[in-house]
Amino acid sequence: MRLAIYLALLTAAVTVLGPQVHSWEVPVPSSTNSPTASMAASQTSAAEVTPSWVKDSVAKMERELVAKYGELQRARVQRGLQQVAEFWRAEDGDAATFEDFVRANFAGDQVTLDTMFNRLESLLEQLGGHMHEINREFRQQSDLDLGPVLPFDEIIGGYDPSAHVLDDFFQNKLAFGVLLNFPLTRLDQRLQDGPSWSRRQWAEARLAQGFSKRIPADVNLGIAQAEAQAGQYIAEYNIWMYHLVDAQRQRLFPPKMRLLSHWNLRDEIKADYADSSGGLAKQRMIQQVMERIVTQTIPAEVVNNPAFDWNPFTNDVTTAAAKDSDTATVPAAKPNNAREPDTRYATLQKTFFASRKADPYSPTAPTLIARRFNEDREIPEARVRAMLEQVLTSPLVPQVAKLIESRLKRPLEPFDVWYSGFRPGSQYTEAQLDEMIAKKYPTARAYQQDIPNLLMKLGFSPERAQYVARNIVVDPARGSGHAMGAEMRAEKAHLRTRVEKGGMNYKGFNIAVHEMGHNVEQTFSLNDIDHTLLKGVPNTAFTEALAFVFQGHDLELLGLPAPDARSQSEKTLNDFWGTYEIAGVALVDMAVWHWMYDHPRATPKELNDATVLISRDVWNQYYAPVFHKKDVVLLGIYSHMIDSFLYLPDYPIGHMIAFQIEEQMKKAGSIGPEFERMAKMGDVTPDLWMENATGHPVGPEALLAATQSALASVGGGR
Ligand SMILES: [Zn+2]
């Protein structure tokens, strides 16, 4: 997400989500009780040494402030001085400046402290909200389906007006004012003490966290640019399916079908289960395409180009023998199959290089990996890994696999990680759904107008449905779609969805419903929460989980029958299988980032080789025993791995959380009011949020238990 600094100021929550999730380089929640001087000496400008006079000035000001405000304020005085001293650099001023500042800015009584808190909360909402507004406008051409993206559009899309805000606030000393008066906290404190904090204490903790890092603006700008470039690379990575040919030079896919990697390719595999005659051949061909993308043996010329026919098995490229698009660029040279030159991995590496520049300024979480887990997710990496492994090694996996084989009447093939036969709505073909939806939603506007009805079908009262709908704007997306929440109450959330020329199709609808879930969460957790400093949810997995709840009801929203008990078992099995699939993908993402940190001087080709190896290893450990095939690289296909800065672990956690939440919704009887109650808890730690929502901490147990009984009820397994 572009709003690095804004988020740093306001909250740990992340707001821009969706299949095309934007990453964010949020210098947010952190401990930060470690002195600046402890930063690695080899790190250049971050290794500022606290000026030598600071210790004396701190002692002097402690005496002075306690004398003025009383002994009861001593603990606050000590903490505030310590926090200011940690970030004070020589360029911030001499001893007299430091002392004058502290004297003037320490809020020594509750009334002043309250005033300061309230005013800052309100002003930071305004700042973040308007910065976000600018960002959204500047990214409009890149994000929306508005015609060609010119080079300058990319520049402006990569620009982040908030990049200098935190710097400015250290320079004008607003940051020191916050650090002097509000407590910095560590993750272990928040985990341990958080449950007994008041809402105000939580809001103060999030306020201070916004100032717990002092990352230079140029570093944040570099991250934003790398992210924008990666997003662009991904958003234009289409495969023209009509131009895939098999050994007999037959075309398996219809004209004009253009699938965005990897989302649309994966979804086409899922849809092909409904095609009993030709589906299997199509699925095998798509798997072959995906593997060539992962290994970068895909011919560069066939990427987003309908001018060539391509046999992904032999890798032969020829001039297109049939035309299905006016946009085909006339081949300049003879067709050739020169491979894509590791662009995929060079792009990923650029996000790593940019992220790594922030490391020296983040002493308590000195890698992007640590920032993701300890700060953004607020669940330690080891615990996340354990939850993933608990699913991957569950004895339920081979049981469900056996059930799938019995339904497919053939041994599993690797692409069956995307098996979609558990879907409650699979009695409809995708074509039927496409037709139904295109009629209902010929334009993005038609979808927008239907939002209140959709929300009422989900159990929201007419009043709440209208209220939320008024806060959502639907835009036509360039990519597969995403949700962009507002950052201040005067602004609206944006739902970006892809509408093809003939109207919305099922894929687009399914994604739009997911993104609408994000928008509804974003609206409640911003507009209806007690403290805007606590707006949002604990981490992205939660907003994903809430979005999955919506997405899981997409067929009902079309007026198709609500799933019966058997269908619900099918849905549970689908969730379980999906979690099993994405848990491995998440482990690949995690291992790739560790590899990049271990090999900072690697070439893109070396990163390519490493990713292929990692994908194979994870496959061999957790999937080969079930699929009876080794060395498959499919787990490396996810586009998020390239442009989303270690985001993928949020998906399996999201499934687990979704399951916990869905179970709670069932208990409550209706989605709407319960969704609103949960979304208004805001940005506390994940376990605390989940305890409040469901009575249990985050974990896969609910999913596993339900899978067990679902297996029993559909009579599979054993
Ligand atoms: Zn999402």
Image: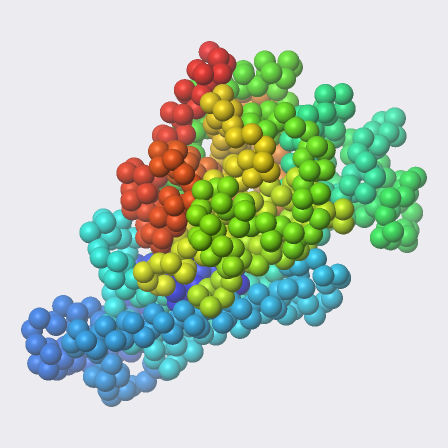
Residue 332 visible, this orientation: yes
Residue 365 visible, this orientation: no
Place residue 387 in its image quadrant.
Answer: top left
Is 443 left, or right, of 544 in this rendering? Answer: right
Residue found 44% across the figure and 73% down from its top? 127
Image spot of residue 609 (x, y percent): 62, 41
Residue found 65% across the figure and 69% down from its top? 155
* Nearer to us in this view, 330 or 226: 330
Is 5 left, or right, of 119 in this rendering? Answer: right
Is 571 left, or right, of 182 in this rendering? Answer: right
Residue found 27% across the figure and 49% down from its top? 191
Image spot of residue 497 (x, y percent): 63, 51
Compared to residue 270, the image places residue 380 above or below, namely: below
* Nearer to us in this view, 2 or 361: 2
Q: How many marks?
A: 0
Q: How is the image coloured?
A: rainbow
Image spot of residue 382 (x, y percent): 37, 40
Image spot of residue 373 (x, y percent): 40, 49
Is 353 left, or right, of 148 in this rendering? Answer: left
Residue found 42% across the figure and 41% down from its top? 671
Place residue 64 in its image quadrant.
Answer: bottom left
